[in-house]
Amino acid sequence: MHPYRDDKPPRPGPSVPIIRIKGGEQRLFIVLSPAMIGYWTHWGGRATVPCTTKALGCAGCHARPPWPMRWKGYLHALCLVKHYDCFIELTPVAAEMLTLQIDNGVSLRGLKMEIRRSPGTNGRLKLIVHGKPTLLKDLPEPKDPMISLDKLWGLNQREENDGQAT
Ligand SMILES: [Zn+2]
C-alpha cells in the first residue's frame, strides 16, 4: 500500500503567483530561472488547458474543431516593485524579445529586465534587458512553474501520485 502523504497543508491558489502584465503596467524583475520554460496550451473557450499532445489523447487536439493552441513562456523571477517571487507569463513575441537581447546559451539567471505593456486590453508586451546585478549568489533558488501551473490548470496532483504508486 502506498498512502498519499503530504506534510504541507494545502493552501488555496498558487503559492507562487503567476504574473501577467496588464495594459499600461510596467514592472522590474530579476530573473531566477536559468532558461525559459515553455508550454503549449489550448484555449478551451473558458479556460487554458495544457496540451498533452495528440498521441497521448489530448482532449484539445482531438476536439472538432481542435481548440486553438497557444504557447506560453514562464520565468521564475523576483518582482523588484512588490518584493515577492513570481512566475512571469510571456507571449511568444515577448520571449523572442528576450532571446534577441542576450547571447546564445547564456543563463538568464540574475538578469534584470523590465516588462511593460502598452495601454488597452490588447496592449503589446515590451521586454527590455538591463544587464546583470552583481549579487548572483544571494538570489533564491529557481522554482519550477509546475508548482503553480498544476493549480492554474486544475490538474490533480494526487491522481498522478496514485497512478505512479501502482
Ligand atoms: Zn493538445
Image: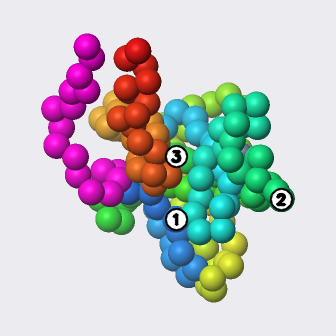
Q: Is mark 1 within 8 Å of ligand 1?
A: no
Q: Main secondary structure of the magenta part?
A: loop
Instruction: Give me the residue at 83% from left, 59% from top.
Output: 65
Q: Amino acid at mark 2?
A: Pro
Considering only vertical position in the picture, is 162 above or below 31?
above
Q: Amino acid at mark 1?
A: Arg
Instruction: Give me the residue at 52% from left, 33% from top.
Output: 34
Considering only vertical position in the picture, is 8 above or below 30?
above
Outermost residue on the right side: it is 65
Find numbered disc 2 in the image and state the secondary structure of the residue it sits on: loop
Specify whether 152 is left or right of 13. right
**Quarter occupied by the N terminus:** top left
Q: Nearer the viewer, mark 1 or mark 2?
A: 2
Instruction: Give me the residue at 27% from left, 17% from top.
Output: 2
Q: CA distance from mark 1 to mark 2?
A: 28 Å
Task: Give whichever of 145, 119 is nearer the camera.
Answer: 145
Task: Give whichever of 15, 33 is nearer the camera.
Answer: 15
Query: Residue beneath label 2, please?
Result: 65
Task: Give whichever of 150, 22 is nearer the camera.
Answer: 150
Specify whether 122 is left or right of 131. right
Considering only vertical position in the picture, is 78 above or below 165?
below
What's the mark number on residue 155?
none
Of callouts 3 and 1, the N-terminal one: 1
- Tag 3 and tag 1, C-beta contact below 8 Å: no
Of callouts 1 and 2, the N-terminal one: 1
What's the mark number on residue 20?
1
Residue 46 spot, x, y in % from top left: 59, 69
